[in-house]
């Protein structure tokens, strides 16, 4: 199929289900550098494309160069090019690296390529450099590479708290926090966050972001022990330059925001997705539905993102649901969180470039043959065609709840059919009060009170088209209670 002048506007829903990876408990080996005479350094161009997918842009390791996966960890528009960085699991493999795409869709692997596990990207405007993986790219496209950082699984780069003009922070999946000079590329290890945050469990740090005078980091350790709540290895924590404070012992996977505006952090527990919002120095907590259980493990969350996908338009990808996010919050309240689409695609990053909304992928690991992934070019508005939003979750899952205790607000808007399942284990009847915040400003109104008999259960269906920004639940006596919403 030959390309037409314009790519078709529709997106294919590509199902990409992450499979378990081998777990490397030992320190990851050093990253490998591609040989200088590698033929992939030459430019490749092809007119063949199908629904915005260009086969010649697929990244893969030659033969069995990756024994696990081959994903696109980061995308960034810079120096008149689109840049992508690949990743393998545990820095195991060869033949992957840094890629650049021209406006004529010519594609090549850059000679500075290093095979590793990289999913970080940031623009450092003070020095006019794009940082992606261990690479520093100036405004003309010249690339420098930190050999020291290339040995680590880089998951996030964030602005420096006290010297943002000359330094940035790098965080590794193992929880090492580095301070790096953007001019000399010299790095200094500041913290081992596994020790600093007292984490007992598999290390899997992901997102980090600097906002409102603090660096916020996320560790998404989660397996059956966390589901059964016999261990709490996940973390959301902040550092003011002097002291570390743990905000949550649940797994968190992404932290992002906009200069001077609210900071978002997304994580989860077995009950639902958790959304934390930092606004004017104060944290609030909300809950969102899960669009899929496929992402219910630290391995399978690669990589939920919160990005400014186009000017002043924020998107969040969390647990199989794309959301539109508000850029501004007022009076410390958040509303306008709107689900866009359900999906199973693993989308490690997305970016707007030359009129296209571009999605990276982690599409095929060694369970399906030669590991490989590609890019998808289209329109940001086509996300609404991927699949109608559906999801489930709630604030309580067989939890010990106190009388009058108010649950976290749970997202209600943007879904069609809605029901909440209520149950408890008390020998006495329990009254469940359902309240809604339809304005999104914290003005709660009683929707309905439901009396559930001793050790009883009751499903409350909401009328078609009924919605509010947030819904919450309270009970009138101490009990073990469940409140679980399902949206179809």
Image (cartoon, rainbow, N blue to C red):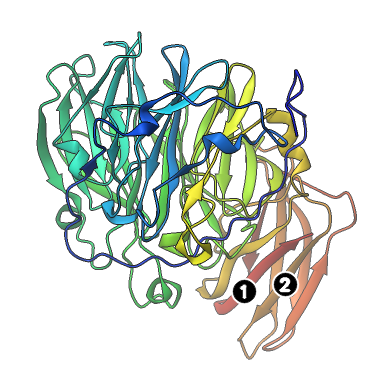
Count numbered badges in the picture. 2
> Does 79 appear above or below 293?
above
Residue 245 lies left or right of residue 226; in this view the side is: left
Q: Are marks 1 and 2 in contact (CB under 8 Å)?
A: yes
- Mark 1 vs 2, N-terminal side: 2
Mark number displayed over residue 482: 1
From the top left corner, tell me how far across and down residue 339 is, in percent.
69, 43
Question: In this orientation, which residue lies closer to the viewer: 472 or 304?
Answer: 304
Question: Distance of mark 1 from mark 2, alpha carbons?
Answer: 7 Å
> Alpha-carbon neighbours of circle 2 within 10 Å: few (<14), some, or many (≥20)?
some
What residue does disc 2 label?
421
From the top left corner, tell me how far across and down residue 318 is, in percent.
56, 49
Residue 22 lies left or right of residue 461; in this view the side is: left
The quadrant of the rendering that contains the C terminus is bottom right
* Res 41 seen here: yes
What residue is shown at x 67% (from left), y 51% (from top)?
343
Residue 41 lies left or right of residue 36; in this view the side is: right
Residue 240 lies left or right of residue 222; in this view the side is: left
> Does 358 appear above or below 374?
above
């Amino acid at each position: 199929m030959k390309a037409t002048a314009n790519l078709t506007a529709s997106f294919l829903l590509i199902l990409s289900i992450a499979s378990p990876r081998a777990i490397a408990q030992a320190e990851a080996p050093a990253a490998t550098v591609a040989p200088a005479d590698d033929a992939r350094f030459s430019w490749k161009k092809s007119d063949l494309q199908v629904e915005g997918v260009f086969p010649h842009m697929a990244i893969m390791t030659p033969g069995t160069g990756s024994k696990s996966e081959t994903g696109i960890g980061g995308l960034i528009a810079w120096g008149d090019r689109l840049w992508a960085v690949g990743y393998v699991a545990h820095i195991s493999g060869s033949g992957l690296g840094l890629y650049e795409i021209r406006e004529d869709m010519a594609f090549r692997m850059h000679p500075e390529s290093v095979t590793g596990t990289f999913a970080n990207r940031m623009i450092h405007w003070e020095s006019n450099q794009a940082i992606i993986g261990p690479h520093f790219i100036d405004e003309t496209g010249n690339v420098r590479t930190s050999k020291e950082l290339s040995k680590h699984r880089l998951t996030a780069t964030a602005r420096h708290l006290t010297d943002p003009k000359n330094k940035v922070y790098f965080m590794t999946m193992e929880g090492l926090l580095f301070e790096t000079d953007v001019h000399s590329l010299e790095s200094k290890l500041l913290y081992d966050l596994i020790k600093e945050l007292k984490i007992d469990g598999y290390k899997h740090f992901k997102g980090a972001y600097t906002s409102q005078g603090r660096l916020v980091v996320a560790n998404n350790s989660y397996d059956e022990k966390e589901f059964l709540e016999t261990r709490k290895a996940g973390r959301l924590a902040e550092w003011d330059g002097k002291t570390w404070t743990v905000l949550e012992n649940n797994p968190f996977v992404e932290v992002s925001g906009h200069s001077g505006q609210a900071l978002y952090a997304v994580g989860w527990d077995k009950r639902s997705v958790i959304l934390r919002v930092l606004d004017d120095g104060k944290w609030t907590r909300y809950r969102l539905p899960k669009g899929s259980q496929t992402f219910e493990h630290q391995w399978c969350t690669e990589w939920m993102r919160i990005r400014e996908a186009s000017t002043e338009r924020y998107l969040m990808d969390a647990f199989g649901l794309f959301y539109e996010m508000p850029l501004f919050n007022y009076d410390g309240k958040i509303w306008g969180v709107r689900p866009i689409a359900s999906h199973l695609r693993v989308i490690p990053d997305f970016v707007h470039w030359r009129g296209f909304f571009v999605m990276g992928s982690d599409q095929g690991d060694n369970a399906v043959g030669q590991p490989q992934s590609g890019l998808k070019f289209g329109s940001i508005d086509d996300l609404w065609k991927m699949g109608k939003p559906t999801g489930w979750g709630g604030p309580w899952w067989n939890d010990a709840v106190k009388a009058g205790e108010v649950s976290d607000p749970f997202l209600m808007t943007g879904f069609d059919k809605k029901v909440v399942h209520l149950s408890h284990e008390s020998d006495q009847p329990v009254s469940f009060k359902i309240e809604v915040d339809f304005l999104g400003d914290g003005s709660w109104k009683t929707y309905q009170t439901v009396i559930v008999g001793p050790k009883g259960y009751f499903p409350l269906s909401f009328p078609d088209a009924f919605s509010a920004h947030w819904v919450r639940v309270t009970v009138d006596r101490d009990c073990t209670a469940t409140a679980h919403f399902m949206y179809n």
